[in-house]
Amino acid sequence: MCMAKKKTGFLAEFQAVPPLELDVSEITASQFHVAEADSYWCFCKLLGVMQNHYTFGQPGIQESCFKVKELLKRADSELYEHLTNEGVDVLQFAFRWLNCLFLREFSAKCIPRLMDTYLAEGDDLSHFIEHFCLVILLKWSAQFKEMTFQSIVSFIQNPPTKRWTVSELEIALSETHRLRTTFL
């Protein structure tokens, strides 16, 4: 196996081949069982932290949507007011982001880095994702302030994040950490 040229993230030191370049036909049965066990552990860890997001009524997501709204009011009250005046409720887009953990908003090449961050966050994952929502909103704040309801909704449903590189994602993740210390 060849070593990846650039390694980033919590689990990168264990990564011999970038995930999207891995030829699964070359995996031995033993390696497959280890990968399956590790995947199951990661899934259980993530679900354990986010369990209240996926129970009846999804109280975790409801609470996080409220927190995103409050963070936006504090960080960019003009954007919050514009969204409100246009009839765009944070719940309309943050619910999807929080429910899908942003996996629908990024390309497959960014997902391993995003999931790596989620696992590294551990029990503080909900707070991290709430601040990540804020970073995404602030990134296009100026554009949103010029848009009407339909344009905002269309933009949020198909954000430019699908075209981001891993490096661009890492900048947003770093900004999330910075904002999390600013808005405790």
Image (spheres, rainbow, N blue to C red):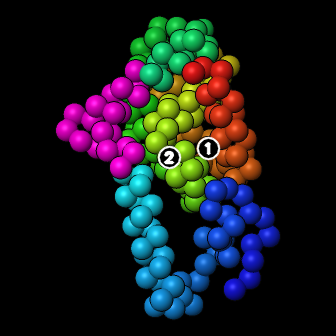
Residue 58, image x and y in percent?
27, 35
Question: Would you say residue 63 sits in the magenta stretch?
Answer: yes
Question: Magenta residues: mostly which secondary structure?
Answer: helix
* Quarter assignment of residue 183: top right
Residue 172, image x and y in percent?
67, 38
Question: Would you say residue 87 sits in the magenta stretch?
Answer: no
Residue furthest right as drawn: 5
Identity, as a three-letter code, of the amino acid under mark 1: Thr
Locate the C terminus by quadrant: top right
* Quarter assignment of residue 14: bottom right
- Which of these two is toward me, 177 or 152? 177
Residue located at (47% from left, 28% from top) = 153
Residue located at (67% from left, 56% from top) = 9
Q: Residues within 10 Å of mark 2 (few under 14, many from 20)?
A: some
Q: Which mark is residue 122?
A: 2
Locate the N terminus by quadrant: bottom right
**Relative side of 64 to 168, left or right:** left
**Relative side of 50 to 132, left or right:** left
Identity, as a three-letter code, of the amino acid under mark 2: Gly
Q: Is residue 107 visible?
A: no
- Above/below status of 65 relative to 5: above
Residue located at (57% from left, 39% from top) = 159
Q: Which residues are magenta?
A: 48-66
Dot 2: element: helix
Residue furthest front as drawn: 123
Q: Which residue is mark 1?
A: 161
Count of numbered circles on the image: 2
Q: Residues within 10 Å of mark 1 (few under 14, many from 20)?
A: some
Q: Is residue 123 visible?
A: yes
